[in-house]
Image (cartoon, rainbow, N blue to C red):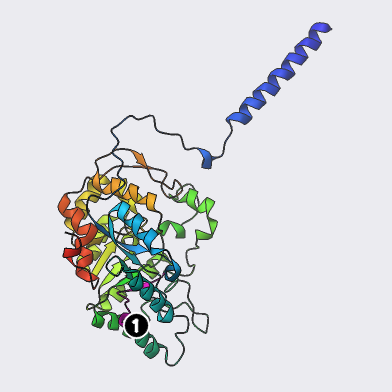
């Protein structure tokens, strides 16, 4: 009897131990992120090889911002010029440009204006918006930024989605061409956001952690429709320069993107928030950036100084198998493109001086 009790005790203890060990081993998929055991040369870069322009940044409260601190951060990165796309327009923009001017940084900080399209049904909307563009440029705006909500989620008085190629907006884009200022436009989001959230979706983890980014196939319209409206806009205004944010959401299909650049000579692209896509296809991406070196700009999007290091490393080094700084954006590892000095200079600053008023090569060389 004693032996039976002892056996039962040992069996229970063993089961409890095994259950505890299994609990310790169990983890969610989201938590699996082991450091690589691969030992390869590492060349982290904290300052760009050449002075550069960041054409895609957001500083919502720049009118009250400590610009001395911003400039010190820019200097540490070798950033010569930053473009604040969040100028808003009207008095808000003038407050920003006045603050920049009073601080003595007109040659370091560029501001783009914004427009409101939700009141597009107002009878004088087109005329007044064109006047706003003229006013803003007179007060220091050097470009127009179109947000993704404009052309995707903004609706008119009847609740209908306002397409970015709506004929009522056309005079605004024509005025930008007349004034010689570029339009940086963000349309849609990664195509995976519109696809089923299943095992075949490469953005599964991002959509799991940030479910509000998930869209139905027609929410608010198919991805292909929104992108086609952007391209129609570009083709309808050949005298206006457009910068497609985020490589126009074709960083994972560079062959297609090349075709689009060939079709639309007034289209430029910038690399904000898509550096991980380039870093996982280093040979093809280097070939693409070399072929289209006159049409590509440097952009970052959200302003976090330490995140620039990853961009520099991808573009400048030949490093292998290093991580992106946001795993939910890119669970894969990246490789450096080791771009030539000629391509780097054009991407970092030369191309920006061609299309943004007030910038010149002398500011960088």
Quadrant location of residue 352?
Answer: bottom left
Residue under the image location 28 percent in, 83 percent down: 174
Quadrant location of residue 87?
Answer: bottom left
Q: What is the x, y in percent for residue 262?
A: 20, 65
Q: Which of 38 and 208 is in front in this view?
A: 38
Residue 145 belongs to magenta span: yes
Q: In this view, does 326 lie to the left or right of 337?
A: right
Q: What is the x, y in percent for residue 114?
A: 39, 76
Q: Is residue 87 left or right of residue 256?
A: right
Q: What stretch is highlighted in magenta?
A: 134-147
Residue 301 belongs to magenta span: no
Q: Is mark 1 on a helix, strand or loop?
A: helix
Quadrant location of residue 21?
Answer: top right
Residue that protrudes farthest toward the bottom in the picture: 123
Q: Is residue 352 above or below residue 160?
A: above
Q: Is residue 13 above or below residue 87?
A: above
Q: In this view, does 12 lie above or below 187?
A: above
Quadrant of image for the N terminus = top right
Residue under the image location 15 percent in, 54 percent down: 342
For the image shown, how many numbered marks are present on the structure?
A: 1
Q: Which of 361 and 113 is in front in this view?
A: 361
Residue under the image location 38 percent in, 29 percent down: 37
Quadrant of image for the C terminus = bottom left
- Per the image, the residue denoted by label 1 is 133
Q: Nearer the viewer, residue 262 or 37?
A: 37
Q: What is the x, y in percent for residue 298?
A: 28, 59
């Amino acid at each position: 009897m004693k032996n039976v009790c002892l056996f039962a005790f040992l069996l229970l203890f063993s089961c409890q131990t095994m259950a505890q060990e299994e609990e310790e081993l169990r983890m969610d998929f989201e938590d699996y992120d082991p450091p690589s055991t691969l030992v390869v040369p590492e060349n982290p870069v904290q300052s760009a090889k050449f002075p550069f322009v960041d054409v895609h940044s957001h500083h919502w409260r720049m009118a009250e911002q400590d610009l001395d601190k911003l400039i010190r951060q820019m200097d540490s990165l070798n950033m010569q010029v930053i473009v604040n796309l969040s100028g808003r327009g009207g008095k808000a923009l003038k407050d920003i440009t006045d603050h920049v001017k009073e601080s003595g940084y007109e040659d370091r900080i560029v501001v783009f204006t914004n427009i409101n399209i939700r009141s597009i049904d107002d009878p004088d909307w087109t005329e007044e918006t064109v006047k706003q563009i003229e006013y803003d440029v007179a007060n220091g705006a050097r470009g127009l930024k179109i947000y993704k909500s404009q052309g995707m989620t903004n609706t008119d008085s009847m609740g209908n989605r306002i397409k970015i190629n709506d004929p009522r907006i056309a005079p605004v884009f024509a005025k930008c061409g007349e004034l010689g200022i570029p339009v940086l436009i963000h349309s849609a989001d990664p195509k995976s956001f519109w696809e089923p959230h299943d095992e075949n979706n490469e953005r599964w983890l991002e959509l799991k952690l940030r479910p509000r980014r998930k869209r139905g196939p027609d929410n608010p319209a198919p991805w292909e429709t929104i992108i086609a409206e952007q391209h129609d806009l570009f083709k309808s205004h050949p005298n206006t320069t457009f910068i497609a944010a985020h490589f126009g959401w074709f960083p994972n299909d560079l062959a297609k993107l090349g075709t689009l650049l060939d079709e639309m000579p007034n289209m430029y692209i910038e690399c904000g928030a898509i550096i991980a896509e380039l870093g996982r296809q280093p040979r093809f991406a280097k070939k693409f950036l070399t072929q289209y070196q006159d049409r590509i700009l440097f952009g970052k999007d959200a302003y976090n100084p330490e995140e620039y290091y990853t961009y520099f490393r991808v573009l400048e080094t030949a490093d292998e198998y290093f991580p992106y700084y946001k795993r939910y954006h890119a669970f894969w590892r990246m490789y450096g493109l080791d771009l030539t000095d000629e391509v780097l200079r054009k991407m970092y600053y030369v191309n920006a001086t061609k299309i943004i008023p007030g910038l010149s090569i002398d500011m960088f060389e």
